[in-house]
């Protein structure tokens, strides 16, 4: 009988409030605060053992395949960099058999540059699949930190810290990023009625533009380092919005959630010039004109997915207006679970 395949998935997330405060050096100096929630879109990683000693990486959504000899440290400057970096980590830490042939297949439920934390969710999923393969003890904090180290430090890809922790833990979380690389994930104990109301009130809209977040994030980091007063004020306002959003959600005050969402969107635009653009502004105006209470971009900005808060009765009216305006809008479902790994039955 053939070896059973290892399956893993990690959820994508919507950034509700505080986005940008998880970036260094702001969170290292002042502490960051994020409120986000995971949704029913996933990054997947599947591992199959091979008898031929070949190491194969397949990214189905990117239509990319590469093969290597097992047991070698792989160049992470090109190719499927996430796959290579994770393989290198488990190989160099002597928990992976260097002679073991593998096929590692991945896919993501959204286009690249979505603003839904897809790249970090993918790294978390690959790491967890390899952890299961190697039977390595690794808690959720350790898993998220490893994914952060590989993506941000080893591969030098720009970004903050929230995505890895959101993908690992799942659910609606208030996450604090403190000096000395300390992270505290606070799952919010929101009643089912409030969660149902929030879910029925949320719409996501694909702008059609896969944005490169790196230049936006680099601009934000430079503003922090130069201690630009306006940019720092915007970041402190975003941190306050995350705290306010926590209380608004726990109490089920959805109108206040909308006010905070709009307020934080204005603050977000103050952190870098290219957070918004003509397309985003137009779709934002279309959504509000159709009845949305509030909206913002999920992620760094410049494109990707927007999110809108609506009265549930108006949800499909707003979706129809956004689609007629050239967006691709849909309802979403919130998820309570983070990364999950299992073997093929």
Image (cartoon, helix red, strand yellow):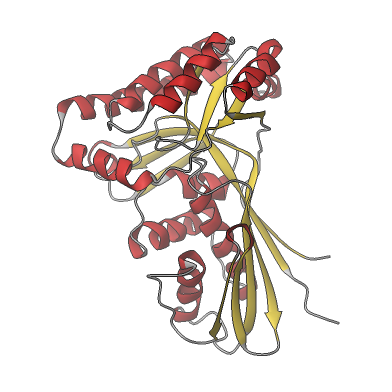
Q: Residue at x 53, y 79 (%)?
A: 95
Taking 166 as reference, is 52 left or right?
right
Spot occupied by residue 7 in the image (x, y as percentages of width and height): 70, 63
Residue nearest the viewer, comparing 251 with 91: 91
Q: Is residue 190 visible?
A: no
Q: Quadrant of the C terminus?
A: bottom right
Spot occupied by residue 87 in the image (x, y as percentages of width and height): 51, 74
Relative height, residue 239 to residue 167 (above, below) = above
Residue nearest the viewer, comparing 179 with 60: 60
Taking 70 as reference, is 213 left or right?
left
Q: Is residue 245 visible?
A: yes
Spot occupied by residue 98 in the image (x, y as percentages of width and height): 54, 87
Spot occupied by residue 111 in the image (x, y as percentages of width and height): 56, 47
Which image quarter: residue 278? top left
Residue nearest the viewer, comparing 60 with 245: 60
Q: Residue at x 40, y 77 (%)?
A: 75
Relative height, residue 257 to residue 307 (above, below) = above
Q: Quadrant of the N terminus?
A: bottom right
């Amino acid at each position: 009988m053939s070896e059973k395949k290892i399956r893993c998935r990690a959820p994508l997330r919507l950034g509700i409030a505080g986005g940008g405060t998880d970036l260094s050096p702001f969170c290292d100096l002042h502490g960051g605060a994020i409120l986000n929630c995971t949704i029913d879109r996933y990054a997947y990683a599947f591992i199959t053992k091979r008898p031929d000693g070949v190491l194969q990486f397949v990214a189905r959504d990117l239509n990319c395949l590469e093969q290597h000899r097992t047991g070698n440290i792989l160049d992470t400057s090109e190719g499927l960099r996430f796959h290579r970096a994770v393989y290198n980590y488990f190989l160099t830490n002597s928990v992976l058999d260097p002679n073991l042939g593998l096929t590692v297949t991945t896919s993501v439920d959204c286009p690249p540059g979505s603003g839904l934390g897809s790249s970090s969710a993918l790294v978390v999923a690959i790491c967890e699949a390899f952890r299961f393969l190697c039977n390595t003890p690794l808690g959720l904090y350790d898993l998220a930190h490893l994914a952060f180290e590989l993506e941000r430090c080893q591969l030098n890809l720009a970004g903050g810290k929230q995505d890895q922790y959101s993908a690992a833990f799942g659910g609606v979380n208030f996450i604090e990023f403190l000096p000395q690389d300390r992270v505290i994930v606070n799952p919010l104990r929101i009643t089912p009625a409030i969660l149902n109301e929030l879910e029925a009130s949320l719409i996501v809209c694909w702008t059609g533009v896969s944005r490169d977040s790196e230049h936006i994030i680099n601009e934000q980091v430079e503003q922090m380092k130069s201690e630009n007063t306006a940019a720092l004020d915007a970041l402190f306002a975003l941190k306050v919005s995350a705290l306010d959003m926590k209380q608004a959600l726990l109490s089920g005050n959805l109108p206040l959630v909308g006010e905070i969402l709009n307020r934080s969107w204005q603050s977000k635009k103050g952190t870098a010039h290219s957070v918004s653009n003509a397309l985003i502004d137009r779709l934002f105006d279309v959504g509000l004109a159709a009845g949305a209470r509030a909206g913002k971009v999920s992620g760094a900005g410049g494109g990707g997915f927007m999110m809108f808060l609506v009265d549930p009765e108006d949800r499909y009216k707003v979706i129809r207006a956004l689609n007629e305006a050239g967006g691709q809008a849909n309802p979403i479902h919130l998820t309570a679970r983070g990364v999950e790994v299992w073997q093929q039955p």
